[in-house]
Amino acid sequence: MSNGFTLIELLVALALAAILATAVYPGFSAWLLDSRRDAMVTAALHAMHAARQFAAVRAVWPAHLPMSVRISAHDWVEGGITPSDAVQIARAFKAAGADLIDCSSGQVSVHQKPTYGRMYQTPFADRIRNEVGIATIAVGAIYEADHVNSIIAAGRADLCAVARPHLANPAWTLTEAAKIGFTAIDWPRQYRTAKPQMEANFQRERAAALAAVTPGSAQ
Ligand SMILES: Cc1cc2nc3c(=O)[nH]c(=O)nc-3n(C[C@H](O)[C@H](O)[C@H](O)COP(=O)(O)O)c2cc1C
């Protein structure tokens, strides 16, 4: 199924991107080993290295296509990247030509103490979007279409990324669209007979929920 857009993302945040993170955040590997942040890690150095790394990839990616960068906006560990550092990092990537900042967090230290919860990383996307003036992607524990719509409508991010809900339910996007009554979405041809049934079932659920809170509407 095509989503109708093409985007490349540079990952500088999480453990899976540790090699690049080492280049972007001087002292990263020492910090991983020693659970401490190298004294040389400053916002200014982030800016310099990040811009260099980004420019190398941007140079080989078509200019008319967007490029985003995933950052760790909060390392959740003493001496790690803070949300204020993340604002500086985002500024550096913006200056280097990034189109979007994808705001993740953590997973660089076993000593991290994240505060998990619904949409828990969205405040980072919100702050960077509104302080730096660059488009952002919110990610992390966004698991209902209503979460996505509220984030976008409130101007907290420009896109939402959804990972684990798609592992639990590969048809998550189709299911959530039906749940909120959005029917103008293509299903894979082999599954199409299931679409009207799911939409009708959710429509009945919405009508019942509405009737339950609307005085005098019970039939
Ligand atoms: C199977 C899997 C692979 C992932 N691989 C990466 C990765 O390579 N780089 C990265 O930055 N995040 C990776 N993530 C993290 C997700 O992109 C996402 O930030 C995280 O799962 C939180 O979002 P969620 O609550 O929607 O799952 C991965 C997640 C899953 C479940």
Image (cartoon, helix red, strand yellow):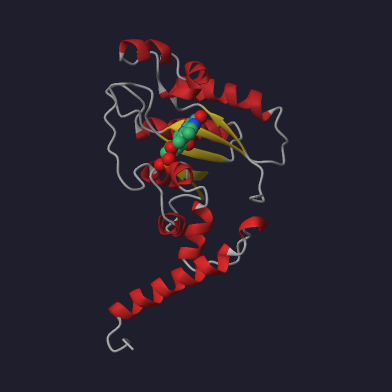
Snapshot quadrant of residue 192 = bottom right
Where, quadrant-wise, is the C terminus in this rendering?
bottom left
Q: Residue at x 70, y 32 (%)?
A: 61
Snapshot quadrant of residue 75 = top left
Question: Quick one: 4 or 43, which is closer to the camera?
Answer: 4
Q: Residue at x 28, y 22 (%)?
A: 111
Answer left or right for 210 relative to 49: left
Q: Is residue 139 visible?
A: no
Answer left or right for 170 relative to 104: right
Disc count in the image? 0
Whole-percent x and y of residue 136?
50, 44
Question: Quick one: 24 or 203, which is closer to the camera?
Answer: 203
Q: Is residue 199 above or below residue 187?
A: below
Whole-percent x and y of residue 5?
66, 48
Whole-percent x and y of residue 4?
67, 51
Answer left or right for 65 relative to 154: right
Q: Residue at x 38, y 27 (%)?
A: 107
Snapshot quadrant of residue 54 = top right
Question: Quick one: 210 or 191, which is closer to the camera?
Answer: 191
Q: Residue at x 45, y 54 (%)?
A: 148
Q: Is residue 178 above or below residue 18?
A: below
Q: Is residue 127 above or below residue 145?
A: above
Q: Is residue 95 visible?
A: yes
